[in-house]
Structure formats: structure tokens, C-alpha cells
Amino acid sequence: MFVDLDVHQGNGNASIMADEPRVFVFSMHGAKNHPFRKQVSDLDIELDNDTGDEQYLQILAQTLPRLIMDFAPDMIFYQSAVDVLATDKLGKFGLTIEGCKARDEYVLLSLLLSHKRHNSLPAHTYTKYRENH
Ligand SMILES: [Zn+2]
């Protein structure tokens, strides 16, 4: 599984893994940011400029644990880019350093907690995920 929280869509991973059902690509990125021609990930969440800490973290919390539970990945690559920060001239999400730190802690905690739960969950397949969502 790819969890790509760079402000720019993970279009390379989305494209390369498009026909690979064993890999789930999740990208949360700026709707009005490069690349302007987006690829199709397994789940793309597009956010507006100046989303800010509260809304960003709320959307992440509503999404990531469910994805991890449903897909039950053996391995997760986390793209923890800092171009979500308000100080990034090209990012435009407007997150504070505290918000970015909270994001990373939340993602890592979700991964740690899910690791334990995986072992007792039945294996969910990509196909099953796609049928239900
Ligand atoms: Zn970027």
C-alpha cells in the first residue's frame, strides 16, 4: 500500500500500479496543484488550497484507518512530504508545523495499531474493497 500525503498527486505510483491489484495506492493531494493531469489511484482525495490543519487531519482520520482495515496491507510506503506546510510556496495547503507533525504521528500510530489488528482479521482482497466502495 502507498499512503501518499505529498501535496502533489502520486501520479507515478498511480500509473505504475494501475493494473496491480495487490497494491493499493492512496493519494491525498491538492486539486489545483501539479500534476494538472491526474492519474487514477485506488483512492484519490483532492483538497482545496488553504485546507488547513483541522480539515486536513479530519479527512485523514475519516479515511486512513478504514483503508488500512479493509485492505490489510502487508507493507505500507508512507510519503510524508512537507510541502503541505504553509511555508511551502508551491504547496498551498496551509498546514502548520504542528499540523504536519500531528499528521505524521497519526499516520504512524495508525500503522502501528493496524499491525496488531491485521493478524486477527480475515484477508481482504483488492477486489472485495472495490466491490464495497
Ligand atoms: Zn510535492
Image (spheres, rainbow, N blue to C red):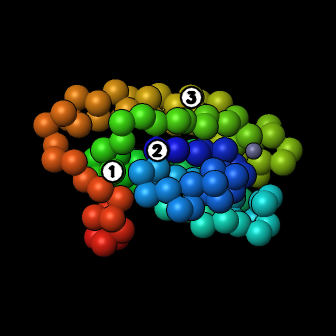
C-alpha distance separating marks 2 and 1: 8 Å
For disc 1, the neighbor class at 10 Å (few under 14, some 14 to 19, many from 20) is: many
The disc label shown at residue 101, or none: 3
Estimate the x, y position of residue 67 in percent, counting from the top left.
36, 52
Q: Residue at x 22, y 48 (%)?
A: 123
| Left or right: where 12 falls relative to 42 | right
Q: What amino acid does circle 3 point to? A: Lys
Q: Is residue 1 above or below residue 75?
A: below
Q: Which residue is mark 2?
A: 1
Estimate the x, y position of residue 50 in percent, counting from the top left.
69, 55
For disc 2, the neighbor class at 10 Å (few under 14, some 14 to 19, many from 20) is: some
Quarter, ligand 1:
top right
Q: Which residue is mark 1?
A: 71
Q: Residue at x 77, y 69 (%)?
A: 37
Is residue 2 visible to the viewer in this orientation of the structure?
yes
C-alpha distance separating marks 3 and 1: 25 Å
Labelled pair 2, 1 in contact (Cβ < 8 Å): yes
